[in-house]
Image (cartoon, rainbow, N blue to C red):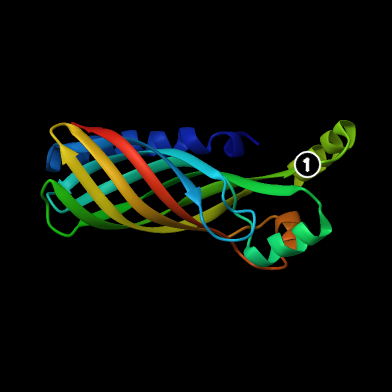
Amino acid sequence: MWLIRSVPALSLSALMLVSPAVVCADTGGTVTGFGGVTVSGLESQRPSLGGTVTFNLVPELQIVGEVGRIGNVLPSRAETLLSVGQTGLRASAFYGEGGVRTYLGRSAVSPYVEATGGIARVNLRVGGINATIDDLLQLGLGFTNSTSPTAGLGAGVMWQAGRVAFDTGYRYKKIFSQGLVDRLLTSGQQMTSHQVVFGVGVRF
């Protein structure tokens, strides 16, 4: 239970441990907050929020750390079945990841690609039913949920104006869920997310 509640804290601690060595290699990086929306499936258009910290290794290569919340991670087939059944079920995820980002040249407008990996906690929510029944269901689902490994890919463009940076991009996340209820609800499919994100940050 302690590990489940500590996903963001563990991710930030890992960043603090690696940052001194990274900064010594080539000082500089960015702190960025972002928002976005998932763009796959019937009910996927739900907001996502998060934050990213990057540290330069060399001018075209950075270490990336990210924590955030994905608004929806249900596969499209599962969404179809649940929509027809009018269950009101939603699945979001809190995650923490680390990885690398490489730039395709550095200038005021810099395209990039990245790869990340980490852990996530999937949260299932049932709507449209009696509050007492919903609380009981949440209690049962809480015992079956657990942290799961994640993998991510991304691409985008970083726009820089002085110390201010703007990020426009795409993120793909895959959650390798180990929970029994998660597997049943997704019909054996992996939980994934396709997101369009927009962020603003500060260079240091």
Q: State the SS at label 1.
A: loop
Amino acid type at mark 1: Gly
Asked whether, in this view, residue 59 is left or right of residue 112, the answer is: left
Taking depth in this image into account, of 178 and 154 the one nearest to the observer is 154
Q: Give percent across and percent down for residue 23.
A: 17, 37
Residue 124 appears at what percent x and percent y? 70, 45
Which quadrant does the C terminus fall into? Answer: top left
Residue drawn where x is 81% and y is 54% of the image:
86
Residue placed under numbered mark 1 in the picture: 127
Residue under the image location 18 percent in, 52 percent down: 110
53 relative position to 41: left or right: left
Q: Position of residue 172 (x, y in %)?
A: 45, 58
Residue 138 picture quarter: top right
For the residue pair 35 and 61, the one nearer the viewer reads as 35
Residue 83, how many percent across, how many down? 75, 58
Residue drawn 61% across the image and 34% down it: 2
| Residue 73 falls left or right of residue 130 | left
Q: In this picture, is 175 found above or below 119? A: below
In the figure, 70 relative to 183: above or below?
above
